[in-house]
Amino acid sequence: MKPSHFKGKEALEHVIEARQKGFAASAEVHGTELPGHYNAAADAAKETSLILTILWTLSVSHQLSLFFLCGWLVWKVGRSAILGWSRLERLHRLIEEERWEIEHHRTQERAELTALYAAKGFSGKLLEEVIDVLMSDDNRLLQVMLEEELGLTLGVYEHPLKQAAGASIGVAGAGLIMSFGLFFLPSWGPALCSGLIIALCSGTSAQLERNKVAPAIIWNLAVAALAALSAYLVAKAAV
Amino acid sequence: MKTPFVFDEFFASGQEESISPFLTKDSKKWGKNLGLRSACSAGCFLALAFGFSFVNQPISFLFLSLVYFFAGVPALLGSLKDIKNLEINIDVLMTLAAFIAVVIGSGLEGALLLVLFELSHGIEENVSRKAKSALHNLNYLAPKFAHVIGENGTLFEKAVREIGVGVQLLVKNGEIVPLDAKVIGGTSSVNLVHLTGESLPVPKTVGDELPAGARNLEAALHLEVLRTSSDSTLARIIQLITQAQEAKPRLQRWLDRFGKRYASTVIGLTLLFACALPFLWSIPFSGAEGSIYRALAFLIAASPCALIIATPTAYLSAISACARSGILLKGGITLDALASCSQIAFDKTGTLTTGELTCTAMEPLDLNALSLAYGLERQVVHPIATAICKLAVKKECLPAPIRGFRAIPGTGVEGVSEEGVVLCIGIPDTLAEKKPGELLALLTVGEKRFLFRFSDQLRKEAPALLQQLKTHPITPLILTGDRLENALPLGQSLGIATIFADLRPEDKLAKVAALSDQGGLAMVGDGINDAPALARATVGISMGKIGSATAVDASDVVLLNDDLSLLPWLFAKAHQTRAIVKQNLTLALVVICFATTPALLGLIPIWTAVLLHEGGTLLVGLNSLRLLKR
């Protein structure tokens, strides 16, 4: 067995390390949420509403806020797409590396599979047969290694442009709702709408992540309120 | 149940994101033709920027910045990559000119350069994408795993690449032989048509060798592996195709070389003019009349817009006309190559012939006996059986009921009629009556005997095609893997004097290489055995319907409806395209000379130079559109 592949580690340790690599490659920073167009939209809507609320509390003119929103929209859309492409590039690099491993280090890949399936409770002749079946087809083997070794899931990610479209809907939607709030209830409408948007988006994201909805909404609202208040009070103190 | 992913296509495409295994099914369409879509968006924004430039300057600039974002950023990235590789080419020149145009206040002109540049790249990328997976389909044909017979007689699947010499395999009816092997048990017949061009099923029994890729038609065969996957027949064909593609003369090289020289010269001259003009004409370095401004105006005027679209627009118009006629061209440069061909080589089986076994005669013709044969053969999947069934349908016979049907692999089929007469169809003992290129089958009905004759039929359009080709300065010849005795009658009936037969894929490749080097050679073929030759020929032409996916991938031209009669039209179109490309290049160079010289001398302002420049581009585009006519 070539030490260059496992770098002095046991097969199972190598698998654990590979799985961490897989998680790092598939993760993406969009707040704390999972990647995808829904989450990109929710994240963009929350950030937009909070920033517009801060601008409103600081009495920045509506016109300036609108100009800011245009630039902000482009930034959020572009950033979301870039993050998506960056993630896709990392995933494609991983799949290429794994394919290379399968082609050039079959013995080591067999050892990794054996370690993985032994950890699942397979042993003896059955383990050997399972490994033989998995090793008999490279396509199947690559899929198994991606899913079992690297912990990746195939066919679940959204295209970066679709994600960016989600972000654009989030910014535009939040901007529109905030404008309605400002138009109908100038004194407290923006704050109310902002709270509403943040609550709705946090709740949806939590549900998609299968997290608890109520704590997510309350925590997000609290952080947003703290952020807006901080900006307002610091500005007051400075003036 | 989860469907397993097939990663081969993804890797063969160069990890194209529109088929990324990580993306959801719905999401994949977002990644299709991104380059072209981005260029089209940039084109729309440019139109808006131009429109708003008369009404509202800031809005016009906003749209202009979007053009630079969608078309400029990809161009800039590409150019930086070229510069990193120490390559100064047309792409670098265009990008430089487009960005310098902003500096000297001609952003719209720069944006136009970028849009044209990105559009031509996007279209080119789209056209050539299909050719990327040349070997992908061959990998589909090669089985990934085989049924290995274990020590205790048990069967288990094993990856082909892990199977060594001497291992025993079982290949069932209908399966493809995974590795080159020797028959050690069983009798069957195999189809080698895609591998060798042999159209008739070949009987195989103990002791016979079988190449990887052959399809087992009848009973299960017990095989012993003779060569590992890396040395197998299919692996050798893959290697031959790769070599042939690399060795293929690339006419694009001339354009690339020209582009590099042109770009280096223009950039060099720009620097020279910026530095030297003040000393020659006593003009300042800076200012609207200064040498730097004039040098930059020269750079923009010399950016080869018309030159860049001179070839792709002509080729794309011709490609479009061809597509409407049922011909798929993988890149415009193929048309230029076609125009240079002085010989055309045809594969025999599947190209000049239909590639299907046809029952040409039943001797003596007896409809009752044919009905009995139909009853027997409809229970079998075999080319002979299919041909007999087709003849029976043609003669409007119904299948007679048969009892006690039994297929004897490698020998034939037998059964009993309703009246209790023993029936048998098999290969006749004596081959005295057999003509060249024919296959015989004998039907025995009790004491009566009937002979069926089979052969691969000539395509209907083939004689007319050969007649039409005589009006072109092109010599036809036949290259086939089939035996000379089978090819000779066909050549004689079509008036083709030069026939090369008994060619293995490597022989065919060597012959095609030699003929291509003598003068351009267009090769028409359909089988996997033709693929290396199709890739190596000056132009490879494959049959879209009957052709193997590998041959289609390896070729430059695909006749989508297998209609050979289109070939003379295609040659005429290729000559017309070459003439129009020449006209376009001349026109583009003349326009560039007319635009750059007055700009350099300061006789005309930069916008006039650009206008002249774009006028030339328009003329070139319009000239190309003439090729759209069918």
Image (cartoon, grey):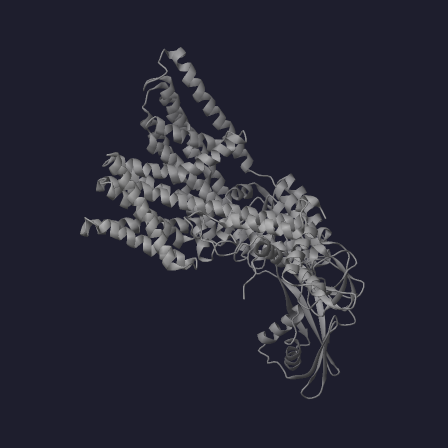
Residue A151, quarter of the rendered image: bottom right
Query: Is residue B449 left or right of A231 when viewed as pictured?
Result: right
Residue that lies at the very extreme toward the bottom in this rendered image: B419
The N terminus of chain B - image quarter: bottom right
Residue B212: where, in percent of width, then height? 70, 57
**Of B48 and B16, the residue lying toward us:** B16
Residue B159: where, in percent of width, then height? 68, 58
Q: Is B596 rendered above or below residue B482?
A: above
Residue B153, quarter of the rendered image: bottom right
Query: Is residue B595 left or right of B139 when viewed as pictured?
Result: left
**Of B529 and B501, the residue lying toward us:** B529
Q: Is B616 rendered above or below residue A85?
A: above
Numbered circles on residues, count: 0
Residue B285: where, in percent of width, then height? 37, 15
Query: Is residue B601 left or right of B534 when viewed as pictured?
Result: left
Can residue B468 be seen? no
Can residue B563 be seen? yes
**Of B173 and B575, the residue lying toward us:** B173
Residue that lies at the very extreme toward the front in this rendered image: A237
**Of A81 and B133, the residue lying toward us:** A81
Residue B594: where, in percent of width, then height? 38, 26
Q: Residue at x 32, y 23 (%)?
A: B604
Residue B602, quarter of the rendered image: top left
Q: Residue at x 41, y 50 (%)?
A: A163
Query: Is residue B226 left or right of B578 when viewed as pictured?
Result: right
